[in-house]
Image: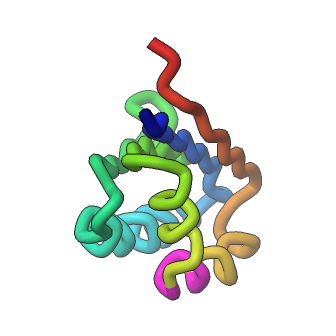
Amino acid sequence: MTASLTCLATFTAKKDCENKLKEALTALVEATRQEAGCISYTLHQGSENPLLFAVIEHYKDKAAFDFHSEQSYLLKLKEILPELVDDLAINTYINCA
């Protein structure tokens, strides 16, 4: 059985860039949800700190995540992230229970 893969991507927007970052991240949601291997893809903004964002992504397997990572809309985001974020962390996890 192939293990599903979860990605937790967290972003801290630069001061006064939270709206631009939110717009850029929101633009990925529908396209990513249409990918064959995407199980779910949700964007969250900090309830107490609006500079914080988290994207919780679930894929059927690593190949589906790798496919997502190569999409033009994600590559475009990677190009503009340095001007929008102070901190970024992308961690992946496999289902173990």
Residue under the image location 46 percent in, 48 percent down: 61
Residue at the outermost front position = 1
In the drawing, does residue 20 fall left or right of residue 31? right
Q: Quadrant of the N terminus?
A: top left
Rendered location of residue 91, percent (x, y): 66, 40
Residue nearest the observer in this picture, 16 or 84: 84
Q: Is residue 92 magenta?
A: no
Q: Position of residue 90 (x, y in %)?
A: 66, 47
Q: Nearer the viewer, residue 26 or 90?
A: 90
Task: Indicate the position of residue 28 as horizontal and vertical percent values.
Answer: 38, 70
Q: Residue 94, relative to residue 57: is it above or below?
A: above
Dominant secondary structure, magenta: helix
Residue 14, quarter of picture: bottom right
Q: Nearer the viewer, residue 75 or 23?
A: 75
- Number of numbered callouts drawn: 0
Q: Using the image, determine if residue 27 lies above or below residue 92.
A: below
Which residue appears at 42% of the width and 62% of the height? Answer: 22
Residue 71 versus residue 64: which sits nearer the camera? 64
- Residue shown at 49%/40% (left/top)? 5
Q: Which segment did they paint magenta?
A: 72-76
- Tell me if 36 is positioned left or right of 64 in this view: left
Q: Splitting the image into 4 quarters, where does residue 79 fall?
A: bottom right
Residue at x 55%, y 51% (from the top left corner): 62
Q: How is the image coloured?
A: rainbow
Does residue 47 lie above or below 65 as drawn?
above
Q: Measured along the vertical axis of the image, is residue 41 above or below residue 92?
A: below
Residue 94 coordinates in the image, percent (x, y): 55, 31
Which quadrant of the rendered structure holds the C terminus? top left
